[in-house]
Image (cartoon, grey):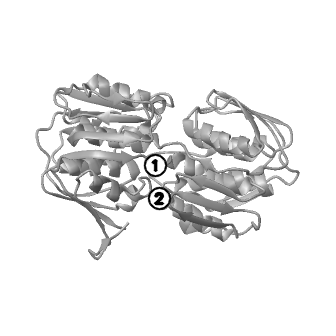
Amino acid sequence: MKNMIIQGGNRLSGEITIGGAKNSTVALIPAAILADTPVQFDTVPDILDVHNLMIILESMNVSSNFKHGVLNIDPTQIVESELPSKAIKSLRASYYFMGSLLGRFHRATLTFPGGDNIGPRPIDQHIKAFKALGAQVDEDHGTIHIEAPNGLHGARIFLDMVSVGATINSILAAVKAKGTTVIENAAKEPEIIDLATFLNNMGAKIRGVGTDVIRIEGVDTLRSTNTHTIIPDRIEAGTYLSLAAAIGDGVTLHNIIPEHLESFTSKMIEMGVELQIGEDSIFVPHSTELQAINIKTLPFPGFATDLQQPITPLLSRASGVSVIVDTIYPQRTKHVKELQNMGMNISAEGGLIMVERTREMHGARVSAGEIRAGASLMIAGLMAQGETVITKADNILRGYDRIVWKLNRLNANVRIEDESGVEVIE
């Protein structure tokens, strides 16, 4: 694991460009193996999750190359093989290979996926969908075996809870199934729309994405004829918006879809941040008097659970007590103790996170328990006086495109070191 070293206290200013959405990318790469031709993605974020997914592709004889934000994948020589458990366990989104392998070969065997530990995230809804489509599912000591010996057929799938992962896996499995599949109580996230756009451009017949009912007419082949440009990362954008409001003297973010951020930007405006929102950019001016707010995370278009941690350091600048309720992952509180170690007035009790105004924070040695917890510590480290060392910084690098380069462009002082203290150049 690497360490992120931050010399805090610098005021930040300038311009950065937001990368492609991580949560789209980690679904699109598994989806690529459903194609009957090579595929190409543009504006791919340079993050560890992408490189781990490429390792998984290689294990199936799927060639890929990634350079300057462009990822080429050729699944035409794909073979069934045992997937590398280390790469599978490094990111939870590897479970999308369950749906795509089932759609391609009518069977899949995976070790249970890993990723961030942010509380219970069962895959029972995924399994329910696979069974509805005609698959048999067995688990044996942490390995999941899925097989549809008679092929996959269209079905009605009602998700007992709104789940992005289960919605995506249902789409991946159903897109080549015989007949019509209807997914009810589907998630509406923009990343699901992005996935469906990619598949439809190859000849899939998916309707209703962005609503709670998705209809899929199975097709026999999927052929790519053009490059798919991945949508901007709304979570990366929200992280930089929080950072810019907390310690910025004027920061402009480019490559933004403002509609994807309305639940977040509305809360910033409620705090008193005078955002200037353009068609595809947002300018964050120097912010002075800020007011406490209440936040409740909800499925899209509500306030994203992935942004409750990145906004926390900004809340510490507001007058009064801000309260966060995470209805998606109530146990997502790994950042609280670490921020307390930096001097922030923050506490978690009874499912609530409470943040009071903090006059000054100090650098400390803290640990990034998961991606977004790491992002909150990174922002706090930039705000704090002195040096902050964030251990397990790989978790930050998993989710943020060229993070050190972008931060230092804004006048931050950040570097990555390996365990022996040698600087790592991104």
**Residue 265: x, y in percent?**
37, 29
Which residue is depicted at the point 21% across and 25% down?
291
Q: Does residue 347 appear in this view?
A: no
Q: Where 295 falls versus 221 (above or below)?
A: above
In the image, farthest residue toward the right: 150
Counting residues from the start of the chain, the first of labels 1 and 2 encountered is 1
Which residue position holds label 2?
46
Mark 2: give few (<14), some (14-19) or many (20+) Cα within 10 Å: many
Where is mark 1, residue-wise?
A: 19
In the rendered image, the vertical position of residue 133 relative to residue 298, given as above or below? below
Residue 295: % across, % down? 35, 28
Closest to the observer, 120 or 29: 29
Residues at discs 1 and 2 in contact (Cβ within 8 Å):
yes
Instruction: Determine which quarter of the picture holds residue 321.
Output: top left
Give the number of the disc on residue 44: none
Left or right of 206 on screen, residue 191: left
170 or 222: which is nearer to us?
222
Question: Picture coordinates of residue 403 (x, y %)?
Answer: 36, 55
| Quadrant position of the N terminus in the picture | bottom left
- Mark 1 lies on a secondary structure that is loop
Rendering quarter of residue 314: top left
Residue drawn at x 43%, y 27% is 262
Please report the residue visible at 59 percent of the width from the left and 58 percent of the height from the top: 112
Which of the pair 304/68 is nearer the observer?
Answer: 68
Residue 190 visible (yes or no): yes
Left-right relation of 192 to 263: right
Which secondary structure lies at badge 2? loop
The one of 295 and 30 positioned closer to us in this rendering: 30
Q: Amino acid at mark 1?
A: Gly
The amino acid type of the residue labelled 2 equals Asp
**Crowding near the residue tagged with mark 1, few <14, some 14–19, many ≥20 C-alpha atoms within 10 Å:** many
